[in-house]
Amino acid sequence: MNMPPVVIHLEMVKRAAAANVLSTKESNRRHQSKVNQRRYRQEQMHVTDQLNQSVSQLRADVARMEGSLDAMRLVIPPSLQTVDPECRIGNEYFRVFANGYFLDPSTTEHAFQTDFLTNVMREDLVIMGSVGREKLIQQWTLYMTTFEAFSMDLHTLHVAIRSPNVVLYTESTLHLRLSYHSVQLLFPHLHDKEPLLQNMVGRTLHLPVQVHFAFDKNRIVQVLGTFANTTHALVNLVGNAIDTVAVLGDFQMSEEAELLVDSTLHTSAFAAAAMTSTPNATYVYPSSYQEKNSATQATVLSLNRYLVLGLAGLILLAFFTVLVGLGTKRPTWWYATLTRWFNITDHDTTSNLLVISGQNNGRSHRPQQTSSNPLTMRLDAWRTFQEEKHVPPPHIDELRHLHYLPPPVTETLDHHTMNAAAANKSTTATSIV
């Protein structure tokens, strides 16, 4: 039996072995991937079940706590209930909206502010004569689109009413930066008073606002009241009563701090005007009265400064002229004039330059009283006084030589000697008798 010849190709064998290895690895990878996906799905299902159980447990806890809270409210009298939650809500409102309302829905701040309003205020919120939270959001949107910059400061917060529902009163200030767009919206009646409008552009309107929060029995804000002192704010902004009256004519803000501007103007009229024309490009507005007043004050101040400097220079020049004339005695006529003015009697020395008489230039002299005080006497009178007071020394013949004279000797008697002398005197007297 003849066997067919077998031809072995090494390259084919290597390729077959490599393909077998690759297929084995691919099958192992597929199997491991299926195992991993199965494990991942199981873990996800386990996490989802745990989250659902946690949510159910939290809901049950919240319901139980709300029931406990209602029971505690019924037990505790209103006079003993605390108002800390309401105060925290008021403070948090001013903290959340301290820099205004974020209009971009994609931002985290916008979502946080929306959730805050949803949680602390009723859906039928009463505000500015309207019902609904939409009115508050609409006003916040108008404020942010009308003014160039916005900030809000809380000054005081106190509880006005505790029962039956809590009412908070707050004092705050809105800082509203005005732009040309906002001035046109707020003061449409001043279109023919361009200098006054330009005077307000770029300045900040500090608006005092009183806000009160009225809560319901669930401590949710039911009424949000506002009151704005627009007159005081405009007086501080404009600076005088005449312009304030003109500005208040058709001011587009109510006493409740409600902006009365038309919201369509933000998107249609002013946007079209901004696209079709470039206002204030070539027109130069006249200077306001504040600028004129500032310029006048600056001019007066500069003139006063130059006047004072000129007078000081003249006084200094006169002083140096007098000093040089008295020191150098040149020229002669100037020195003679100075000695006559200052009544200088000693022309050989200049140490007495400031001896000035009480009356000069031919005025009548008062009779001076004779005094020995050298500070009140003239130089010639002082010399005469010294010559009269001076006593000449004695002549040499009148002087006597000094001789040493011993001190006189005095006998000192002791106590016993004095007693003996007294005894002798008494004996002598007795014998004489």
Image (cartoon, helix red, strand yellow):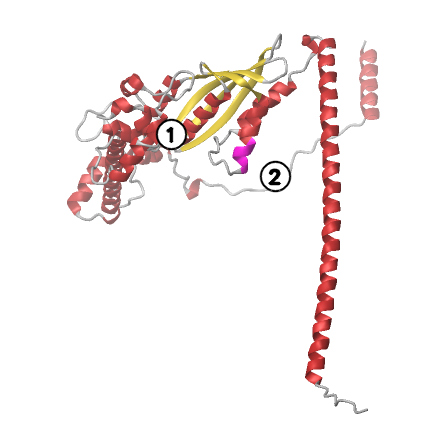
* Residue 98, image x, y percentages: 51, 29
**Whether residue 392 is situated above or below residue 238 in the rendered picture:** below
- Mark 1 to mark 2 CA distance (whole Å): 121 Å
Name the outermost residue toward the left.
Answer: 333
Please identify, in this view, whether the residue under mark 1 or under mark 2 is nearer the observer. 1
Name the residue tied to disc 1: 146
Q: In which quarter of the image is the C terminus?
A: top right
Residue in the image at 69% along x and 78% along y:
15
Q: Residue at x 44, y 25 (%)?
A: 138
Range of magenta residues: 108-112
Secondary structure beneath label 2: loop
Q: Is residue 56 magenta?
A: no
Which amino acid lies under the numbered mark 1 shown in the image of this protein? Thr
Mark 1, other Cα within 10 Å: few <14 / some 14–19 / many ≥20: many
- On the image, the x and y values in percent for residue 320 come to 26, 44
Location of residue 3 by image quarter = bottom right
The mark found on residue 405 in the picture is 2
- The numbered mark, 1 or 2, whose residue comes first in the sequence reads 1
Q: In the displayed structure, would residue 254 be above or below residue 282? A: above
Image location (x, y in percent) of residue 293: 26, 29
